[in-house]
Image: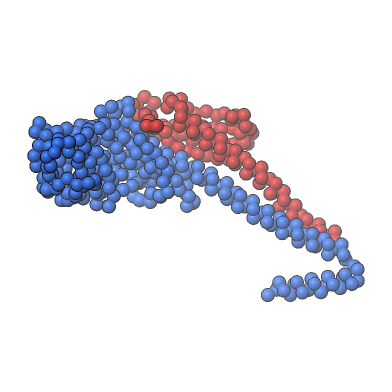
Chain colours: A red, B blue
């Protein structure tokens, strides 16, 4: 009787515990992915406009994540005096297709700061 | 209702079992299961909250970069229309823009935010009683919000001993004839017919009653929506600034991030020096237009 009761109760508890352990790893991935995506966008904000280009980087910053940066013109072109690019950064776990985070912004040419 | 009955039942049966010394292992197992279940439940609640916090952090980051998109797009729009045609300093649009699936920014602000005051060409007439060469326009091409000057306060500092009054202020085709004496800033108010601004700049001139030598003239523009903007008209400075406000949002979430940027066109050296003078995050959501 005891074995039956323990067996019935242990099954859902074990499944829940397994999911919880799994979620700890997923949350770690989400945090890392968000930080890596932010790091890349901040780099794009601080480099020469002409250097903002599309790229796919495996093991980004030596971490086991793949960063895909997509750059496209939303205003003007590469040849016009003024232009704006849309920068989309997606991060996945290396070897996985599941997207962990996606950040999007616009960066315009000739944006200067007084500081 | 049922809970006390169940507890009574467990208590009664447990006592009987203890007396009979039978099924002790089962009781211990059930107690263990109850304790473990409570612990697992608590952990589950903690993990759910943890995930919702992680999700909120991710949306926060997304919103900030969406708000940045609104600022950069506005700067592109102003720069690409600057002096094209030669009657405007350029303009941008207000309202909602979709950047990506479920990702938007909205630009807006007060009338004072959209007021451009170009003081780069400020100068006095030969008799030094008319200050002109200042132009004003609105920074947005959208119909709303309307950018209207209701009145101005003017204060000035004279370097000569002679005191003079202002007797006329002209903005575009509207002249306000008013006599005001010098006063501590923001100075006395000059009110007249409201001046509705467009994306074409119009001249602003101030006339004193007689010749005067001034070291400083400051104007506070009072807009019809109650917002104000202060600009130093004299001495002339290479300034023509306005404010861009942009809120980034992700559909399905009430999280927002708003960035406010003060952009200075610096008209005389525009191509190489126009810049963001100040940029901050503000805790105000742009909800219209």
The quadrant in which the N terminus of chain B is found is bottom right
Q: Residue furthest front?
A: B161
Q: Position of residue B269 (x, y in %)?
A: 28, 27
Q: Quadrant of residue B230?
A: top left
Picture layout, residue B137 above or below residue B32: above
Left or right of B146, for residue B28: right
Instruction: Pinpoint residue B50: horizontal percent, then vertical percent.
Output: 61, 49
Determine whether, in the image, residue B157 is placed left or right of residue B56: left
In the picture, residue B15 is in which quadrant? Answer: bottom right
In percent of width and height, residue B23 lies at 88, 66
Is B194 rendered above or below residue A97? below
Residue B254 in sight in this render: yes
The residue positioned 8% from the left and 39% from the top of the image is B210
Out of B10 and A78, give the one closest to the viewer: B10
* Residue B130 in view in this figure: no
Please tell me which residue is depicted at 70% across the width and 73% down the height of the picture: B2
Q: Please state which of residues B142 and B220 is positioned toward the viewer in this rendering.
A: B220
Tell me what residue is drawn at x 60 percent, y 52 percent. B49
Q: In this image, B194 relative to A23: left or right?
A: left
Where on the picture, by quarter, is residue B67? Answer: top left
Up/down of A89 relative to B7, above or below: above
Where is residue A59? Give x, y as percent: 61, 30
Q: Is B116 displayed left or right of A72 in the figure? A: left
**Count of numbered labels shown in the rendering:** 0
Residue drawn where x is 22% and y is 33% of the image: B236
Q: Is B85 or B224 nearer to us in this picture? A: B224
């Amino acid at each position: 009787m005891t074995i039956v009761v323990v067996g019935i109760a242990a099954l859902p508890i074990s499944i829940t515990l397994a999911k919880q352990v799994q979620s700890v790893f997923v949350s770690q991935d989400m945090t890392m992915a968000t930080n890596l995506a932010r790091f890349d966008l901040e780099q794009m904000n601080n480099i020469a406009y002409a250097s903002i280009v599309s790229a796919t980087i495996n093991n980004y910053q030596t971490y086991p994540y793949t960063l895909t940066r997509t750059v496209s013109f939303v205003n003007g072109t590469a040849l016009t005096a003024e232009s704006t690019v849309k920068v989309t950064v997606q991060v996945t776990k290396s070897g996985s297709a599941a997207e962990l985070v996606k950040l999007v912004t616009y960066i315009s040419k000739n944006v200067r700061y007084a500081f | 209702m049922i809970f006390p009955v169940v507890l009574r039942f467990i208590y009664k049966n447990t006592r009987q079992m203890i007396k009979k010394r039978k099924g002790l292992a089962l009781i211990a197992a059930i107690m263990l299961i109850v304790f473990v279940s409570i612990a697992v439940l608590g952990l589950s609640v903690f993990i759910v909250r943890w995930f919702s916090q992680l999700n909120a952090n991710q949306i926060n980051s997304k919103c900030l970069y969406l708000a940045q998109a609104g600022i950069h797009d506005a700067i592109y729009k102003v720069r690409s229309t600057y002096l094209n045609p030669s009657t405007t300093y350029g303009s941008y649009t207000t309202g909602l823009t979709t950047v990506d699936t479920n990702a938007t920014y909205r630009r807006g602000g007060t009338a004072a935010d959209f007021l451009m005051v170009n003081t780069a060409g400020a100068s006095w007439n030969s008799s030094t009683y008319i200050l002109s060469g200042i132009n004003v326009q609105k920074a947005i091409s959208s119909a709303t919000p309307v950018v209207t000057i209701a009145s101005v306060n003017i204060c000035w500092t004279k370097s000569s001993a002679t005191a003079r009054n202002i007797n006329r202020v002209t903005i575009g085709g509207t002249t306000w004839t008013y006599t005001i004496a010098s006063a501590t800033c923001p100075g006395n108010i000059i009110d007249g017919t409201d001046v509705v601004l467009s994306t074409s700049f119009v001249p602003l001139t101030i006339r004193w009653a007689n010749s005067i030598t001034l070291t400083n003239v400051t104007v506070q523009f009072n807009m019809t929506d109650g917002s104000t903007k202060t600009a130093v008209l004299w001495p002339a400075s290479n300034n023509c600034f306005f404010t861009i406000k942009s809120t980034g949002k992700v559909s399905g979430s009430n999280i927002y991030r708003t960035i406010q940027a003060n952009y200075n066109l610096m008209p005389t050296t525009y191509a190489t020096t126009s810049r963001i003078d100040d940029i901050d995050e503000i805790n105000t959501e742009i909800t219209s237009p």
